[in-house]
Image: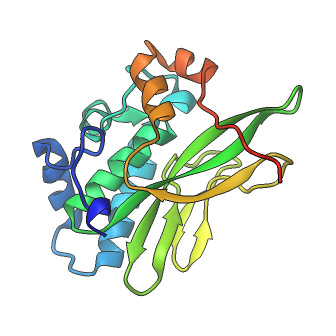
Amino acid sequence: MHKYLESSEYIDWHHPLVTAWAQHLCGELSCKKKIAEQCFNFVRDQIKHSGDYQLNPVTCKASDVLAQGTGYCYAKSHLLAALLRANAIPAGLCYQRLIISDQNPSFCLHGLNAIYLEDYGWYRVDARGNKQGVTAEFIPPQEQLAFKIEQPGEKDLPEIWPQPLQIVIDVLTSSRDYQQVANNLPDVLMLQV
């Protein structure tokens, strides 16, 4: 579990801003499930999805997401992992491969989290932000993610990563604005079995 509690370049929970917010969200709570829910609700509801709101700058590090109040799903998942880890709750990163458009199917990765909750084990949550047609909730043990896997080629990737995928970091750190990210959403090649 140690690797799911580490501070790193992009899940930089040792940053004073992240630590302060983690403590604020924890408040007087001692129940890890309640703390996880507080952190999830904060990231989902208070940090704006860059694409939905057409916001700059492009963020990647958890501390930058928090300071700017915006991030793509990937960046929001980095912040949620950092807030949880700062509260000694193991958290990892997960990805789904989703279809972008119906014409000439193109796909992209979608970033979300897995939280280790003692009573449930690994539990996936999606703090990308709710909007019409997209509703994610924290209701363990039931998962209610933002997107369901419905189309051919879509997939829940089973891994729980301790650090972000390099392809995600590359897109977020090389893009000058939210539109460039939207035009270059990361994807992975899926082998057909």
Could you say which is closer to the camera, residue 175 or residue 126?
175
Q: In the rendered image of this protein, does residue 187 appear above or below residue 5? A: above
Q: Residue at x 39, y 73 (%)?
A: 116
Q: Position of residue 170 (x, y in %)?
A: 45, 25
Position in image of residue 32 (x %, y %): 29, 77
- For the point 54% across and 64% down, which residue is it? 137
Q: Residue at x 75, y 55 (%)?
A: 149
Report the coloring of the rendering: rainbow
**Observer-nearest residue: 165 or 121?**
165
Q: Going by the image, does 166 lie left or right of 187?
A: left
Residue 40 horizontal/vertical position (percent): 40, 59
Report which quarter residue 51 is drawn in.
top right
User: Where on the picture, by quarter, is residue 84?
Assistant: bottom left
How many numbered dots are placed on residues in this image?
A: 0
Q: From the viewer's side, name the closer residue of 52 and 103.
A: 103
Furthest residue toward bottom: 119
In percent of the image, x 17 and y 68: which residue is there? 27
**152 relative position to 173: left or right:** right
Residue 155 against residue 88 in the figure, above or below? above
x and y percent of residue 144 in the render? 61, 65
Outermost right residue: 103
Quadrant assignment for the N terminus: bottom left
Asked if 109 appears above or below 159 in the picture, the reply is above
Residue 157, located in which quarter of the rendered image? Answer: bottom right
